[in-house]
């Protein structure tokens, strides 16, 4: 229980902190004052900043305004999830001051806006690269065998099951590790396929490993319409293992995988929008804070490499969502900057602020609806699923 809660807080905290660090560093590069960088979410518990004389000053509570400090306040806040950065003039005020966001050129402000999602994408690459370095579950194809530094825990696994096949009828599921057939150890996919074909119509004892439990199934091979005259169980098989790569190969694998994931997310988002427009319904499985907590609990039980992959996926997801051109998101603010560039005229700050506030309200409503969906989906099993 404690491990799941800790993992949930750490994962979300790291993702949000990296996002805010992107804004923070890019603002500093362009000479924009970051009034406060907070660890956790307000209210502020304690903060520290450098005075004009160069001395460090400690403040307590939220009464002291961050704008009054001559340099950035680094604060520790009550809610221990994520963080935030408050940039001077981010809402369009203080334009006449050289260290204000509003005083900078449009291209500089654009970079500040996209730097958060950029750092989330970079974090995805790094987390995946770490996974590939430490060892990640993979199918042992030619590429894996060629580039791998080491391979551990080799096994034959079921990676897919045909509908109405002998395997499905027997109760086999995707991910099962096949140990023996008629007490003969499984050495290769080819051995299992040949043995199955040679015993068409006979009852075979298939020993599998699932969730650390050994189960023996009775199964009869059949010739299926799609099996080209061979007797089969109706499963897709693959030799898998924990593959670790040299750091340079791991980094390249991380970059490639991030690209594949990003394209897959874009396609999923397009399909989601199509369903909303054409069918008026959401068919995709969306997860809010509760859903993410449930998934975190499940991933923690699988092991460290799965946690890295899960965190990487969330980081890239955070980047994609934030770059959408919707009010209150980084992409929405970026859109207003693009419009300003095209019009060669500043946006009305009151109207822009109103649009962003409405967008934020709608975003909160969406999160509430997704949370309600999570509650309806998991019901009384939430505690069980998380812990």
Image (cartoon, grey):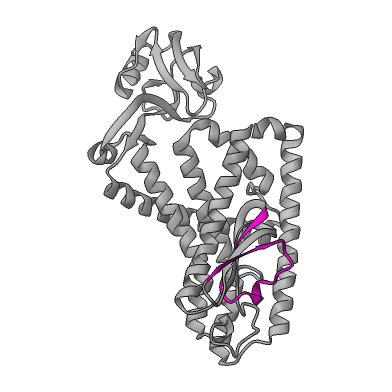
Q: Is residue 164 above or below residue 318?
A: above
Instruction: Please state the horizontal and vertical placement of residue 194, each as a whole percent of the image.
Output: 31, 18
Note whether 213 is above or below 364 in the view shown.
above
In front here: 340 or 34?
34
Tell me the quarter of the picture where residue 96 sits. Answer: bottom right
138 within the magenta span: no
> On screen, 8 above or below 258?
above
Q: Position of residue 282 (x, y in %)?
A: 68, 52
Does residue 258 lie above or below 161 as drawn? below
Numbered-mark total: 0
From the top left corner, tell me how far across and down residue 138 is, in percent.
37, 36
Res. 238 in view: yes
- Range of residues picked out in magenta: 55-78
**Looking at the rendering, in which quadrant would you find the C terminus?**
top right
The image quadrant of residue 56 is bottom right
Quarter of the figure that contains the N terminus: top right
Residue in view at x 72 percent, y 61 percent = 61
Percent across and percent down for residue 29 are 45, 75
At 56% from the left edge and 92% from the top edge, which residue is drawn?
344
Which residue is pictured at 57% across the width and 82% down the height?
Answer: 100
Residue 295 can be seen, yes or no: no
In the rendered view, does 117 fall on the left or right side of 252? right
Which is more toward the observer, 235 or 180?
180
Residue 76 on the magenta segment: yes
x 52%, y 68%: residue? 24
């Amino acid at each position: 229980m404690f491990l799941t809660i800790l993992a949930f807080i750490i994962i979300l905290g790291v993702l949000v902190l990296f996002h805010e660090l992107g804004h923070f560093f890019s603002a500093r590069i362009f000479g924009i004052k970051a009034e406060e960088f907070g660890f956790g979410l307000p209210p502020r518990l304690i903060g520290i900043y450098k005075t004009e004389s160069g001395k460090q000053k400690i403040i307590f509570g939220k009464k002291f305004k961050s704008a009054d400090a001559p340099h950035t306040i680094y604060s520790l806040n009550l809610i221990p999830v994520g963080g935030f950065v408050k940039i001077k003039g981010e809402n369009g005020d203080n334009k006449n001051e050289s260290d204000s966001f509003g005083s900078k050129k449009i291209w500089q402000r654009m970079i500040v806006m996209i730097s958060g999602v950029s750092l989330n994408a970079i974090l995805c690459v790094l987390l995946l690269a770490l996974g590939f370095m430490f060892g990640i579950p993979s199918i042992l194809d030619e590429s894996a065998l060629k580039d791998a530094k080491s391979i551990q825990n080799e096994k034959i696994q079921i990676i897919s099951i045909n509908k109405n096949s002998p395997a499905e009828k027997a109760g086999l599921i995707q991910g099962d590790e096949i140990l023996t057939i008629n007490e003969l150890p499984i050495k290769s996919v080819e051995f299992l396929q040949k043995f199955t074909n040679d015993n068409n119509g006979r009852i075979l004892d298939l020993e599998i490993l699932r969730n650390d439990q050994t189960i023996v199934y009775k199964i009869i091979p059949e010739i299926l319409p799609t099996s080209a005259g061979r007797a089969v169980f109706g499963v897709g098989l693959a030799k898998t293992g924990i593959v670790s790569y040299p750091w340079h190969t791991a980094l390249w694998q991380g970059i490639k995988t991030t690209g594949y994931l990003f394209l897959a997310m874009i396609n999923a988002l397009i399909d989601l929008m199509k369903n909303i427009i054409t069918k008026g319904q959401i068919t995709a499985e969306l997860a809010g804070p509760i859903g993410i907590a449930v998934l975190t609990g499940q991933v923690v039980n699988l092991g460290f490499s799965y946690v890295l992959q899960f965190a990487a996926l969330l980081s890239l997801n955070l980047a994609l969502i934030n770059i959408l051109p919707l009010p209150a998101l980084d992409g929405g603010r970026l859109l207003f900057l693009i419009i300003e560039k095209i019009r060669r005229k500043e946006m009305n700050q009151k109207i822009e602020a109103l649009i962003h506030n409405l967008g934020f309200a709608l975003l909160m409503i969406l999160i509430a609806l997704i949370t309600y969906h999570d509650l309806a989906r998991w019901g009384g099993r939430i505690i069980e699923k998380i812990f």
